[in-house]
């Protein structure tokens, strides 16, 4: 009875426990991949429904939509996977990462930071296990996660402002900021499709959550440094996205460029705004969606060069339609959430007119270039006669449709989901404390 | 008044039905789409009647008072300008839709194509009836994407390249347009049309071009220039016109829609923001300059094309230049009149050109050669008719316009340009039709002159009434003309130089066609050849853009390998 009462007063720790318990139970279903997948889906769905029920009871709050989106993103990333034996580890990892992520977002500071250390360590291990990257990229990614862990440790033992700077560095590993983006890029490019699709939303959400606790009172010098890094990151990410051969690398660097825009916005406005949350969610979702779409190609034809598998529009019409819509969203076209978030940020009265705005516009323009180029290379041209093509399965279609529907919903009525005046939970408590003074 | 929403919604609903059930409907897709587009046309006509008599319709799905609210501000503001554009768009769409039903029937993506046509109609309708600048921009961007979808064909590499270039150039325009919007919002705090115009008028702001420097620019000029670059991309103005000739591989109905509807977006945008443009003479002069350059280059490049569709494409570029030029002279209503006339004319020509090409492919002797040719001796009557057409008639037109119609030509350079255009096109058309042959016939000459007079005055009268219809306040029209006025001597020189050039051109062509030799200095002949090559290669702009693109990519690759690669 006491446990039940505890759940109704603070149900979030129970949710995290559900994620871990779900993973443990999942181990018993290991020999039966189909059952395991269904079980994973049920657990993520249960977490999502519980979150919705909790928010209905507690009333709308700013942090909640981002919390909903995490189990939802986990759900769609799992749903899109074929029930294969090779995918089992990535399913379990998705659930564990969900648990750690939710735990970080809803727990008190010390427990949250411990969960964050676990998550970073787990990501390093996963990168090492899958070894899908080139050696420099792999070690650079692992090194950045190591830096993140080190900075976390420093933040726990050092006094302000060193602890805050260290924390900011850790968060810039999660919400990718040039030149600490290596871990994020490696995770997206080096982990299996559904894990990277989920991480595309999870890591930036965690970083965003953390950065919001530090930014409002940060010294001007730090803010200027961050601003310059953000603008450099936007240019760097765009340039790197343009010259990549591998699709996953293009997507990873593109999202770096997009999240650099978010960093620019945060360092300019110095506060939480619904526009930023909309933008973060939309960019995370659309990146995840694009990863899932490309993963569906990899599942069928292997990890091939995009130039050798072109011409998919005719043999895979459903895939072509959904990819086109996702690319449309990624390029920032209406009615999708990326556009609404971006416009919301640009039209915020706190934005100052400066040369940096020009860089932000160029980043936006560059996205149209490399995304359209990617789309043309994948969909158009002559399709190969020696390949037996197969269009998307129902589960893959459903997962991509869910993502698109969410993107449209937050694009058309962003305020309905994100406009709340006072952030709750982790956001509010930490923002009150002053972390930059000795 | 909510019924007006049905006008854009009907094509959208039809598109959704076709998209969802296209596989089952197949040929019957057209039966879903056509009634919806026809109904939208009828609705647009009713809307025009209502707006003309009752004033603008204003429907907003957002709260104007809560300026800080974060939501997409969707709404409709339909005044006479919007209503006229809606009738034009739905009218042209109806014709194109009905044409496509048969023309595209055997094509593989028949349903998809019809759905896209309906969506494009929806987007165009929403764009012209937008309640604010942000909503206009939303549909403006969607139009860029739809243009890409309509003009690409994934089994034809040249088409794909053209579509890519189209979207890239349009996107450049979109981003600059967005910069203008951001600037307008940052400085005036609103994107509502009327509110923006009022604030811009009441509070002139000056911006420093560089921090600490004395270089300054008026805020309105900066905003309007940025927005104009957006308009330049959609209306294919030099040097952003490159996408239009490359989009010519698209199906014929797409051309008709493109040249009669989509490309008019720039002219509409300038008209919608006319009160803002009226505040910046500098921008209007830039607009005039770009328009003039585009009209000239478009016409020059059109003359040397040997492909019917490319000829028409460059003709559109020239016409759009003319339209933008009219805006630059403050003749905003005339620009709309021009784009309507051009839209209807060009849609007809494009829909027909497919038949001509088809016929030419089937019959090697089509078009039949004229055995008589144009040779022969000049007669006095021929000279007299030419003299009256080119010199006396314009004088009569000018005097009538000034004296009887009471158009203040001295104050409105736009009206003069319009008259000038009317004279050039109609006399050229008549000259082409009758081919001033050596056969002297009073009947032919009289009929030709009479027709010319009727055409010119009808056109002129229609334009005057149309101006009054769109801008009922004469002071507003006068204000635009004043703001756009070029220095008198410059304007006179421009008109005089162009008149001399055209008259000489006619003289040269006429004499040439009749076997007369005219002595031309060697350097002029050389220049002609060089210009021919230059225009044949489209001013080498394609190569330049390509080189720029490759250069950028090469630089980024080199940078990535040398310095940045380790930051993976």
Image: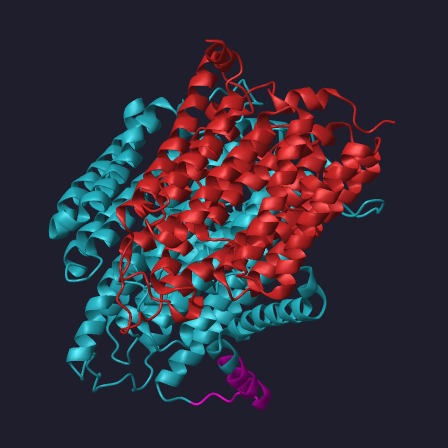
Q: Nearer the viewer, residue B71 or A158?
A: A158
Residue displayed at 47% across by 72% down: B300
* Residue B391 place in picture, x, y as percent: 44, 64
Asked if residue B220 can be seen in this view, the reply is: no
Reply above or below: A342 against A310.
Answer: above
Q: Quadrant of the C terminus of chain B?
A: bottom right
Q: Main secondary structure of the magenta part?
A: helix
The reply, left or right, for residue B441 in relation to residue A46 is: left
Q: Nearer the viewer, residue A294 or B53?
A: A294
Q: Is residue B527 magenta?
A: yes
* Residue A400 place in picture, x, y as percent: 36, 44
Residue displayed at 30% across by 40% down: B87
Residue displayed at 25% across by 63% down: B447
| Range of magenta residues | B517-532
* Residue B32 place in picture, x, y as percent: 16, 42
Q: Colour of chain A?
A: red
Asked if residue A77 can be seen in this view, the reply is: yes
The reply, left or right, for residue B268 in relation to residue B209 is: left
Reply above or below: A5 against A286.
Answer: above
The reply, left or right, for residue B328 in relation to residue A372 is: right
Q: Nearer the viewer, residue B565 or B245?
A: B565
Q: Is residue A38 magenta?
A: no
The reply, left or right, for residue A419 in relation to residue A212 is: left
Reply above or below: B361 against B312.
Answer: below
Q: Quadrant of the N terminus of chain B?
A: top left
Residue B195 location, quadrant: top right
Q: Colour of chain B?
A: cyan
Residue B207 location, quadrant: top right
Q: Nearer the viewer, residue A256 or B513?
A: A256
Residue displayed at 21% across by 41% down: B17
């Amino acid at each position: 009875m006491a446990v039940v009462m505890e759940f109704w007063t603070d149900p979030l720790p129970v949710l995290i426990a559900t994620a871990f318990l779900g993973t443990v139970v999942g181990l018993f279903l290991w020999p039966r991949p189909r059952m395991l997948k269904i079980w994973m889906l049920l657990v993520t769905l249960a977490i999502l429904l519980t979150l919705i029920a909790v928010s209905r009871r507690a009333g709308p709050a700013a942090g909640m939509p981002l919390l909903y989106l995490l189990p939802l993103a986990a759900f769609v990333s799992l749903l899109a996977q074929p029930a294969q034996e090779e995918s089992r580890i990535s399913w379990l990892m998705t659930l564990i990462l969900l648990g750690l992520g939710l735990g970080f977002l809803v727990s008190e500071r010390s427990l949250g930071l411990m969960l964050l250390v676990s998550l970073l360590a787990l990501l390093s291990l996963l990168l090492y296990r899958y070894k899908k990257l080139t050696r420099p990229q792999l070690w650079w990614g692992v090194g950045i996660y190591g830096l993140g862990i080190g900075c976390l440790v420093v933040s726990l033992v050092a006094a302000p402002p060193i602890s805050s700077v260290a924390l900011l560095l850790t968060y810039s590993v999660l919400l990718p900021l040039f030149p600490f983006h290596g871990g994020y890029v490696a995770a997206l490019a080096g982990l299996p499709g559904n894990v990277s699709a989920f991480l595309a939303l999870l890591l930036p959400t965690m970083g965003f959550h953390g950065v919001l606790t530090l930014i409002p009172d940060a010294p001007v010098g730090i803010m200027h440094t961050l601003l310059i890094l953000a603008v450099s990151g936007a240019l760097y990410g765009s340039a790197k996205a343009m010259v990549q051969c591998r699709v996953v690398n293009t997507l990873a660097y593109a999202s770096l460029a997009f999240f650099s825009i978010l960093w620019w916005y945060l360092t300019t406005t110095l506060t939480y705004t619904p526009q930023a949350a909309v933008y973060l969610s939309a960019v995370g979702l659309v990146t995840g969606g694009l990863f899932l779409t490309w993963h569906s190609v990899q599942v069928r034809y292997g990890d091939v060069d995009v130039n050798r598998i072109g011409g998919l529009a005719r043999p895979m019409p459903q895939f072509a339609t959904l990819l086109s819509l996702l690319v449309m969203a990624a390029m920032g076209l209406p009615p999708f959430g990326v556009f609404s978030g971006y416009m919301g940020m640009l039209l915020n009265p706190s934005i100052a007119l400066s040369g940096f705005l020009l860089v932000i516009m160029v980043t936006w323009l560059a996205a149209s270039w490399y995304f359209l180029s990617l789309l043309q290379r994948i969909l158009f041209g002559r399709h190969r006669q020696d390949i037996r093509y197969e269009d998307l399965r129902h589960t893959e279609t459903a997962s991509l449709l869910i993502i698109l529907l969410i993107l449209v919903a937050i694009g058309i009525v962003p305020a309905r989901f994100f406009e709340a005046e006072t952030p709750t939970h982790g956001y509010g408590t930490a923002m009150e404390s002053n972390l930059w003074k000795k | 008044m909510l019924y007006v929403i049905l006008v854009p919604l009907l094509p959208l609903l039809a598109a959704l039905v076709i998209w969802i059930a296209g596989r089952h409907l197949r040929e019957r897709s057209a039966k879903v789409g056509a009634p919806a587009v026809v109904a939208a046309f009828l609705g647009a006509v009713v809307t025009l009647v209502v707006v003309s008599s009752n004033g603008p319709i204003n429907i907003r799905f957002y709260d104007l008072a809560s300026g800080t609210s974060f939501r997409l501000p969707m709404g409709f503001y339909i005044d006479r300008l919007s209503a006229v554009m809606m009738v034009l768009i739905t009218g042209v769409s109806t014709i194109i839709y009905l044409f496509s039903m048969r023309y595209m029937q055997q094509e593989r993506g028949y349903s998809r194509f019809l759905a896209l046509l309906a969506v494009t109609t929806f987007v165009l309708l929403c764009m012209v009836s937008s309640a604010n600048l942000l909503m206009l921009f939303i549909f403006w961007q969607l139009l860029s994407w739809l243009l890409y979808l309509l003009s690409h064909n994934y089994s034809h590499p040249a088409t794909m390249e053209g579509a890519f270039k189209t979207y890239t150039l349009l996107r450049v325009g979109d981003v600059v347009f967005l910069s203008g919007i951001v600037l307008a919002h940052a400085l005036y705090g609103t994107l509502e049309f009327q509110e923006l115009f009022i604030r811009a008028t009441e509070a002139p702001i000056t911006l420093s071009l560089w921090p600490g420097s004395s270089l300054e620019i008026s805020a309105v000029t900066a905003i309007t220039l940025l927005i104009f670059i957006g308009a330049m991309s959609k209306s294919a103005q030099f040097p952003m016109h490159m996408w239009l000739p490359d989009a010519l591989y698209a199906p014929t109905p797409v051309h008709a829609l493109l040249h009669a509807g989509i490309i008019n977006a720039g002219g509409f945008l300038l008209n919608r923001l006319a009160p803002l443009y009226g505040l910046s003479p500098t921008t209007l002069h830039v607009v005039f300059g770009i328009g003039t350059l585009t009209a000239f280059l478009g016409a020059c490049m059109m003359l040397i094309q040997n492909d019917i569709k490319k000829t028409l494409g460059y003709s559109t570029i020239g016409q759009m230049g003319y339209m933008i030029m009219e805006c630059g002279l403050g003749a905003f209503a005339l620009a709309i009149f021009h784009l309507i006339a051009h839209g209807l004319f060009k849609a007809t020509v494009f829909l027909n050109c497919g038949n001509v090409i088809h016929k030419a492919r089937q019959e090697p002797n089509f078009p039949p050669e004229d055995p008589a040719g144009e040779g022969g001796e000049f007669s006095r009557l021929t000279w007299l008719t030419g003299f009256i057409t080119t010199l006396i008639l314009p004088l009569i037109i000018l005097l009538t316009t000034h004296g009887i119609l009471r158009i203040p030509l001295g104050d409105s350079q736009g009206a003069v340009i319009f008259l000038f255009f009317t004279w050039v096109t109609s006399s050229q058309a008549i000259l082409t039709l009758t081919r001033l042959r050596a056969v002297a016939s009073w009947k032919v000459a009289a009929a030709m002159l009479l027709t010319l007079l009727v055409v010119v005055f009808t056109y002129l009268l229609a334009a005057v009434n149309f101006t009054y219809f769109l801008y009922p306040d004469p002071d507003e029209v006068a204000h635009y003309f004043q703001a756009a006025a070029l220095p008198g001597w410059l304007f006179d020189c421009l008109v005089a130089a162009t008149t001399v050039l055209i008259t000489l051109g006619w003289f040269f062509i006429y004499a040439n066609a009749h076997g007369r030799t005219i002595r031309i200095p060697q350097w002029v002949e050389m220049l002609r050849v060089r210009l021919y090559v230059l225009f044949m290669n489209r001013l080498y702009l394609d190569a330049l853009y390509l080189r720029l693109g490759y250069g950028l990519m090469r630089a980024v690759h080199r940078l990535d390998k040398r310095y940045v690669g380790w930051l993976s």
